[in-house]
Image (cartoon, grey):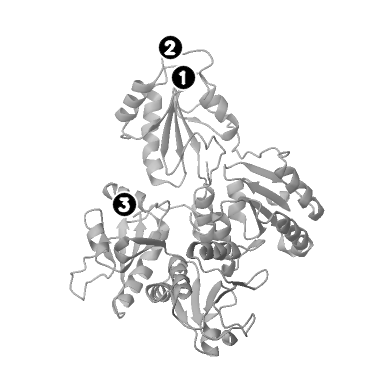
Amino acid sequence: MAIRVWISLFLCVFALLGSESYASENEDTQSKEFVVTLDHSNFSDFVGRHKFIVVEFYAPWCGHCKKLVPEYEKAAEILSQNDPPVVLAKVDANEEQNKALASEFDIKGFPTLKILRYGGSVVQDYKGPREADGIVSYVKKQSGPASAEIKSSKDAEDFIDVNKIIIVGVFPEFSGEKFENFTAVAERLRADYDFGHTLDAKLLPRGDSSVSGPVVRLFKPFDELFVDFQVFDVDALAKLVEEATIPTVTVFNKDPNNHPFVVKFFNSPNAKAMLFVNFNIFDSFKSKYHEVAEQYKGNDISFLIGDVEASQGAFQYFGLKEDQTPLIIIQTNEGEKYLKTNVEPDHIASWVKEFKDGKVKPYKKSEPIPEVNNEPVKVVVADNFQDMVFNSGKNVLIEFYAPWCGHCKQLAPILDEVAVSFESDADVMIAKIVSFPLDSSLSHNSGIYWRICLLLDATANDYSQGTFEVKGYPTLYFKSASGKLLQHQGGRTKEDIIDFIQKNRDKAAEQSPGKDEL
């Protein structure tokens, strides 16, 4: 199963907090709340009447959503005074009637903000700050022209941030097919990068100042610092920009300037090689690792180096310990992981080659097999998953859950009752496996790690992800004794679940030898 895209390298833990409500647009000024509430009944009509609108998809129990409420409301009030006014709206994606909307916009975590343009015909991810002033600044820029004109050295100095990707088109005149194609690329990629255009290359801080264009100059804070393109086909230019904005080696530390590149790294379709090292010995690994990255550049593998101190969330995700560092781990798009612990700089190249040659065995993450497993709902982990689910010869209802999930907590006593009702039935087992383990204290302090985990489809136990598609919690699957596999998508009362099991189970006498495995 391909790695699902999360948004940006950092996470999915939600606290059970009170619901927020938003007032109508039509309330009087004194009590008015400026964030507009949308739902399935008015969403399409309202969005269709706006050239530009920002929509937050949230859940009432989400701690990060709760934190965003006053900032989003303050930003909405300020933007309502803009000329023209800019609307911020929100949708309760946890509400059953709005879940089709959440699915349409591919909402995998909360809060998720989307920019909708031209009546909703163009949808882009909001990738800006989450505090009021930052929201206002980002939204104003996104609602204005896709590319800003650079007329002076002061314009260039203010516009070209040395810590960001900046793309500037140099043209002899602001007209013609090439200029129009450049602005089309700027419109397409404006949520990710800042675009500018100028008549004078001498205003730019790097590169050949004598060119009159047309040329596209991409400035970046890594590798060769700038690159020129003379390709103006829209799709081809967009592809070149995307390729040029991935560092040869992405750095993962506490510097927020690196976070966009970390997110881009995890969004890449390539296999992902990650070296975790204490940065006080970083220099001894840097050159060797960069050499390996250069060797495999364009060969379906991307490289990241992470500071151990900043990577605690990643260690939890992969089930690693600091005494195993320096270590390198590779994760493929199919979810397979390959691990080399206590690696030396000179070992990296040979180990990556062994991986590419198929000579490294996959690493499997698992919680410990419980020494005592006598509760009505049995505990399954990666190391006993095959035996308990596929090889047991039983009809197994298995719950994939996360400890922080409010719906999972509500379902727990119901599953206990279901399990008790089948205790005397040797052919049926009710089981559960922790899918996403992240604790709330880590999630609230590691915003970027949260988004990465969504991208990586994080799990506490490496189960058969090609067989079980877990997009939310709780997810229930039923494996019959003869090997039939079904996802339970009906009601979650005790009676609903028992009825589902009884309708789909196999009796022991009906089992066929050799058919108890997929």
The residue labelled by disc 3 is 101
Q: Amino acid at mark 1?
A: Ala
The residue labelled by disc 2 is 510
The residue labelled by disc 1 is 481
Which quadrant of the view contains residue 286?
bottom right
Say whether residue 43 is left or right of residue 337.
left
What percent of the width, then of the height, locates residue 119?
29, 64
Q: CA distance from mark 2 to mark 1?
A: 9 Å
Question: Toward the viewer: 138 or 298?
Answer: 298
Question: Toward the viewer: 399 or 172?
Answer: 172
Q: Amino acid at mark 3?
A: Leu
Name the residue: 81% across, 53% down: 346
Element at badge 1?
A: loop
Element at badge 2?
A: helix
Name the residue: 26% across, 48% down: 97
Question: Toward the viewer: 444 or 173?
Answer: 173
> Can you tell which of label 3 and label 2 is closer to the viewer?
3
Say whether residue 99 is left or right of residue 128.
left
Q: CA distance from mark 3 to mark 2?
A: 43 Å
Q: Amino acid at mark 2?
A: Glu
Say whether residue 127 is left or right of residue 384.
left
